[in-house]
Image (spheres, rainbow, N blue to C red):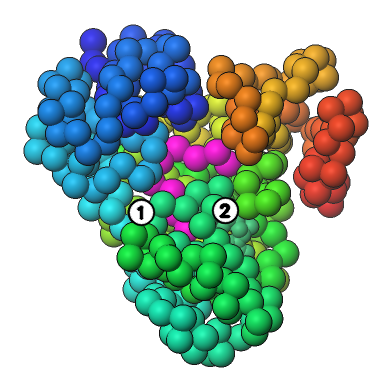
Amino acid sequence: TRTVGILGGGQLARMMVLAGAPQGLRFELFDPAADACAGQLAPLQVAAFDDEAALAAFAAKVDVVTFDFENVPAHSARFLAERVPVYPNPDALAVAQDRLSEKTLFRELGIPLPPFADIRSRDELAARVGEFGLPCILKTRRLGYDGKGQFRLRREADIDAAWTALGAQVERTGLILEGFVAFDREVSVVAVRGRDGEFRAWPVTGNWHVDGVLSVSLAPAVLSPAQQQAAIGYARTLAERLDYVGVFALELFCRGDELLANEMAPRVHNSGHWTIEGSETSQFENHLRAVLGLPLGDTRMLGHACMLNWIGAMPDATAVLAQPGGHWHDYGKQPRDGRKVGHATLRNDDAAALAAGLEAVGKQLDRGDQVAPAADALRA
Ligand code: ATP
Ligand code: MG
Ligand code: MG
């Protein structure tokens, strides 16, 4: 038996453990939080990510290390990589952790993206706002997730407010200003690359966010074949340049015929949860196959799949379970405002039937607003 070590013990680790069990894989988890939810399913070592003695002990227990959490300090990943194979490699992780280096790489690779600039001072912010035009978004370069560490500037007067909100972070996380994209849609490419360089992508997924947090994902996204191909091509170029091994996501904005890259996530991704029931091989299984050097599984899907995130607290499962192709995931977390505590996936061969199922669930769970865009897309 082989043992996979996972840094971070959240729901992504939990779903990896569930995907690895049929293959007889064992897991060891490492997380600073004693109540990390994957710890309900596999042994959990509780320590800080930069505790080198704990990391060395962890490395001794496992055959390979991977991540559920993208913000593990790069030096900790490098420390582990001196002791045990680590995938994705720590350099790829470091690039994806910093919006400035990731966007600089996108530009170098010819992947289109909105204008961006490193921001060191309030004056620089004002100058770049003048250059890009309003609206813009000021973001922390590092450590942001679920839309945290962002400030949207709509008018000149917001420059001071933005600097008040985030200026104090300039030393700790760095800051980046981005042009605001008035997108029609958001999509993501979830893809996997093996140790031997084999590359596969799932159908591009359409995503809807509420307050910066992913709310609903629909696969396949409504996208022209040319856009599908371009999006997957960008993901492949990126993976090859980074010598990336494992699953990752590339988030993109669609504006008319244009595709503009937003960010990459160096791990299995929330917008790929539908692959558990909606695809021949899930993102979690393929991630494990990739980091273990095994052949990758087929990424094709049948029909249509839609995932709904449960944020804050779990609703009642009955409405989802009563649907054909309805599947329920409860991460076993304590309820807390803004926290991802579970999700549901509805799958159906028929787009109109899935739209109707979504609307029924939306109505029963009082989430009609959230499911409406996906139902409309399915009927388009
Ligand atoms: P995640 O949880 O996906 O890692 P994050 O905190 O890293 O989120 P982003 O993905 O950069 O943040 O932004 C969150 C959401 O905010 C995006 O999905 C998009 O809806 C909106 N957004 C971010 N940047 C822009 C932009 N430049 N133009 C328009 N909308 C944007
Ligand atoms: Mg992010
Ligand atoms: Mg994002």
Mark 2 is on which residue type?
Gly
Sequence order check, earlier mark of 2 and 1 = 1
Classify 253 as above or below 37: below
Q: Position of residue 366 (x, y in %)?
A: 87, 32
SS at mark 2? loop
Q: Image quadrant of residue 152?
A: bottom right
Q: Which residue occupies 39% across, 57% down?
A: 142
Mark 1 is on which residue type?
Gln
Label 2, residues with CA under 10 Å away: few <14, some 14-19, many ≥20: some
Classify 115 as above or below 294: below
State which mark lies toward you, 2 or 1.
Answer: 2
Q: Nearer the viewer, residue 227 or 345?
A: 345
Identify the mark at residue 263; answer none if there is no mark: none
Q: Which residue occupies 45% across, 62% down?
A: 140
SS at mark 1? helix
Q: Image quadrant of residue 39?
A: top left
Q: Position of residue 320 (x, y in %)?
A: 78, 21
Q: Which residue occupies 83% across, 36% down?
A: 367
Q: Position of residue 99 (x, y in %)?
A: 41, 62
Q: Nearer the viewer, residue 275 or 66?
A: 66
> Distance from label 2 to label 1 (Cα)?
15 Å
Q: Which residue occupies 68% across, 51% down?
A: 211
Identify the mark at residue 147; answer none if there is no mark: 2
- The reply to whether residue 22 is in sight is yes
Label 1, residues with CA under 10 Å away: few <14, some 14-19, many ≥20: many
Q: Is residue 154 magenta?
A: no
Q: Nearer the viewer, residue 100 or 185?
A: 100
Q: Is residue 273 left or right of residue 24?
A: right
Mark 1 lies on residue: 97
Q: How many marks?
A: 2
Q: Which residues are magenta?
A: 263-271
Which residue in the rendered view is the most extreme toward the left?
Answer: 82
